[in-house]
Amino acid sequence: METTIEVPDRVSSLELRLLGPMALLRRGKSLELPPSRKARALLAVLALSPSPIPRDHLCDMLWDGPSDPRAELRGAVSKLRVLLDDPDRKRMLADARGLYLDLSDMVIDVRALESKVRSGPDDTLMRDWVMHASGVDGKFLEGLEIDRAPSYSQWLLAERRRWLGLQVSLLEKMADSARPQSAEAMDCLTRWLRLLPHDRRAHQRMLEALASRGQLREGNVHLEAAVRLFEEEGQDAADLVKVWRAARERQSGSEVRLIVREPPPPAGEPSSARRGSVAVMPFEETPSASAGDLGRFLAHDVTTRLAKLRSLFVVSLASTSALEARGMGADAAARVLDVDYVASGMLRRVRGHIALSAQLIHTRSGRVIWADNLRAREAEPFDVLDELCNQLVAAIADQVELAERQRAVLKPPDSLDAWEAHHRGMWHMYRFRREDNEIARRWFETATRLEPGFSRPHAGLSFTHWQNAFQGWGDREHETELAWRYANQGLLADDQDPAIHWALGRAHWLRGQLPESLAELNFSVSLSPNFSQGHYSLAFVQSQSGDADAAIAAADHARELSPFDPMLFAMLATRAMALMRLGRMEQAADWAVRASARPNAHLHIRGIAAYCLELAGRHDEALATVTGLRREHSGYCVTDLLQAFRFADDGERLIRRAARGIDLA
C-alpha cells in the first residue's frame, strides 16, 4: 500500500518523489513524466541543486554525445515547463548563471526527509516519512540510470550514497525516540545494521537494547558475530565487549564475566585524550576535471595538512580509500570509521577553472555544517592542488573548531572532558574581555588537569597570561613569565604542536627577545604551513619593528588561510600598522577602521584606528574614535598603547605625533 504524504494546499501544489520510481504529483494526482530518461534526470538534478547550473555543465552531464547538445537541452526544458509551470507562475527559470527551479511551493521527498533528520524526533510527520522511505526500500531514482553519461552516473552514485547516510540518520533518530526495549527500537536498529554492518554505534545500541529486554543469549550471539566482523577487517572490537559487559551488569546488578574473548588493545598505541576526529574522502571527479587522479591527490594533501595542525585526530587516506572502493559514501564511511566529521566533494572543470563542490558533515546529526564551491585557476596540477588544499584545510579546521566551541558551551560544565573544556576556554578567550579571559584561564587549567599530555590547553593558558600582560590586566612582568612557563610546559607535552611554538614565540616577544620570537613563530609555520595563527603572529612582530612588507604578506596569507578567524581584527590591524610604517597613511587608516569595526576588537585596536586616521588627515573621524575609546576607558592615552606594543623608533615617532593631534598624548 502506497504511503500518502499530506501536504497542505497553501504550502505546496507540487510534490516530487525521487525515492523509488520518480513521480510528480499536483495536489495529490500523478502527472505523466516525459518518457525521456534524460529529461527526467534533468528534473532531478535541478531539483537537488542549491544554485543555478550552467547550461554547458548540464550539456556535458547529460548530452555529451549528440551533435547539438544545446538543442537537446532546450527540448527537455520545454517538456518540463509544460509540467511545472502555471499560467501565473513560472517554476522552470533561467538567467545568466544557468537553469534552476523555483521550489518555494514544491515538496521534494528527499529534501523533506533531510529536514526531518535535523528536526526533533517528536515531529508528528516523522513516522509517515520513515514509512514512505521504507516503502521504496531505500532506492533513490530507481530505474533512472543512463548509459554513456559518466558525469551523470557519478552524480547519481553520490546522491545514492548520500541517501544511504540520510537513511541511517533517520533510523538513529527513530531509535532515539523509541523506548529501548520496544519492538520499534529493535526494528530501527536491525535496519540500521542491515544498511551499515560496520557501524559501531548501531552495534552498541543493539547490545544495550538486547540487555534491557533480557535477551542475554541473543546478545552473546550478536557480540560474537560483531567481534568476528570487526576482526576480519583488522579492527579492534574491545569497545563492544565493554558495552555488553556494562549493559549486562546494569541489568543484573552484579559484576559479569564474559565468555567472549576481549580483544587486546593494539600494541604500541599509548592512551590519549579524546580529540575531535575527521575523515577526508577521496574527492570524486567528473571526466572533464583532469587527466590524472587529482581528487585522490587532493584528499591526500588535505589529510596530511590537517594532521600537521595537531588539533584533530585525522583518519588516514588508506582507510577512507578502502571504504570508497567498496562503494561507501561519505556519511556511511564516517559512521564505520566512528569519526565526528567527514569532508567530501566533487571536482569539475568550469571555464578555465577547476571547481570543487565541497561539504563538511557532522556524522551523528547528519547536518552539513559547511558547504562551498571552491575554485582554482586551471594551471599546473601541483598549483591547483596547493590552491584548493589551502582553502579546504582552512575551512575544515575553522568549522570544526567553531562547532566544537559551540557544542562545549552548551554542555553542562561538570560533564566536560579535556577536549571540551579546552574548547569552552577558547570560546571565552576569543571574546577579548578581562572577565572572559579569566574564565578561559580556569577552563584551560581544567583541561590540563584532566589530560596533562594534551598540549593545546597549555597554549591556551599561555595566551590568557599573554593577554593579561598585553592588555594591562595584570602585572606585565609576572604575566609574561607565566605565559613563557605554560608555553614551555606545552612543549613537554607535544613539541610538534605548532600552537605551542606559536605560544612560545609570543612569550619571547613579551620578554623583548625578538630573534627568539621570530625563530619559534617560523618553526610553527614550518611544522604546519596552514597554521594561520603562526603567520599572523609573524606579521604582528614584523609590523612593529621588522620588515613591514613581509608583515603585510604574512597578514594577507593568514587571512587567506582563515578568512573568518576570531583574530581577524588583529590581522587587519597588523596590516594597518605595517602600512603606517611604510608611510601609506590613507591605506593604513582604511585597514585600521575595518579592524576596529570587528565585534571583538579591543581598546588597542581602536587606538590604532584613531592614530592612523589622524596621520591620514582624517581628523574628525579620529576624534570620533577617541570619543568612543574614552567612553569605555576614560584615562586611555598613548602610553597605554606604547607600553603594550614594541614599536621601533620610526613607528613610535608616528604614533606620538598622531597622539598630539587628538589629545591622547
Image (cartoon, rainbow, N blue to C red):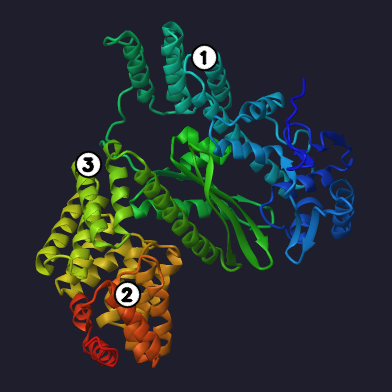
Q: Residue at x 55, y 50 (%)?
A: 359
Earlier in the chain: of badge 3 and badge 1, it is: 1
Q: Are marks 3 and 1 in contact (CB under 8 Å)?
A: no
The residue where tag 3 is placed is 451
Q: Give how far across and how far down residue 482 sits, in percent.
A: 13, 60
Front label number (3 vs 2)? 2
Place residue 59 in its image quadrant: bottom right
Residue type pointed to by label 3: Glu
Residue type pointed to by label 1: Ser
Earlier in the chain: of badge 1 and badge 2, it is: 1
Q: Give how far across and how far down residue 245 sits, in percent.
A: 33, 16
- Marks 3 and 2 sit apart, C-alpha to C-alpha, by 35 Å
The residue where tag 1 is placed is 182
The residue where tag 2 is placed is 605
Q: Can residue 145 be seen from the camera position used here?
A: no
Measured along the vertical axis of the image, is residue 163 above or below residue 63? above
Quadrant where the C terminus lies? bottom left
Earlier in the chain: of badge 3 and badge 2, it is: 3
- Marks 3 and 1 sit apart, C-alpha to C-alpha, by 39 Å
Q: Can residue 91 be seen from the camera position used here?
A: yes
Residue type pointed to by label 2: Ile
